[in-house]
Amino acid sequence: MLTRRSTRQELLAAIHTVAQPLEESGRMQQTKQLMQHGDCSVFEHCANVAYVSCVLFMKLHIDADWEELIRGALLHDYFLYDWHKKEDCHPAHPVYHPTLALKNARMDYELSAKEEDIILHHMFPLTVLPPKSREAWMVCLADKICAVMETFGKVCVRQ
């Protein structure tokens, strides 16, 4: 898989490799139709978060469980509704959606404990409990970086 010295192309290929089975089963295709921030779909946002998470690990010279990191990042916003529409959105979306994303991901995929941690705790500190793994901490940080960049029209990565 990846190492701390992997190239951008190797990283994009790894994300694609992990995303492909998720796209072929479950409801991942729906995330391509739902908008997240700016003109970025939920799927693009999650791919951006996976990319930035991996880059952060590489820049900090920290090893990670790359596959679990990427899968968790790709599934962290698997809530499957348009949060921009009041009739579709839970009133406490920022706090509620990690729980729903985890529920949906469990219905569609087998998850490791680390992947569950990533999904459930990515909105810390809005969620009470902090992440337990370094992969979950990095997704939590990358999610905030990507949200700001996407909101202001900056592209993290387009595949």
Image (spheres, rainbow, N blue to C red):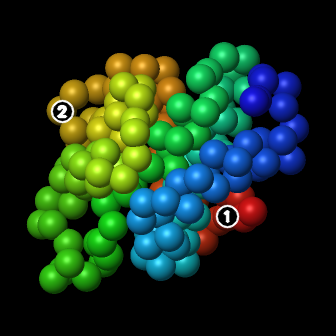
Seen at 47% across and 79% down, the residue is 33
Locate residue 125 relative to residue 149 in the image: left or right.
left
> What secondary structure is marked by label 2?
loop
Report x, y in % for residue 146. 54, 53
Q: Is residue 31 above or below residue 103?
A: below
Among the 4 quarters of the image, the one containing residue 88? bottom left
- Residue situated in front as seen by the camera: 139 or 70: 70
Give, as a three-letter code, the residue at label 1.
Val
Report x, y in % for residue 153. 60, 71
Which image quadrant: the C terminus?
A: bottom right
Locate residue 107 relative to residue 62 in the image: left or right.
left
Seen at 53% across and 42% down, the residue is 71
Give, as a three-letter code, the residue at label 2.
Val
Which image quadrant: the N terminus?
A: top right
Seen at 66% across and 17% down, the residue is 63
The circle on residue 155 is: 1
Residue picked out by circle 2: 128
Q: Is residue 151 visible?
A: no
Among the 4 quarters of the image, the one containing residue 55? top right
Within-10-Å neighbours for mark 2: few <14, some 14–19, many 20+: few
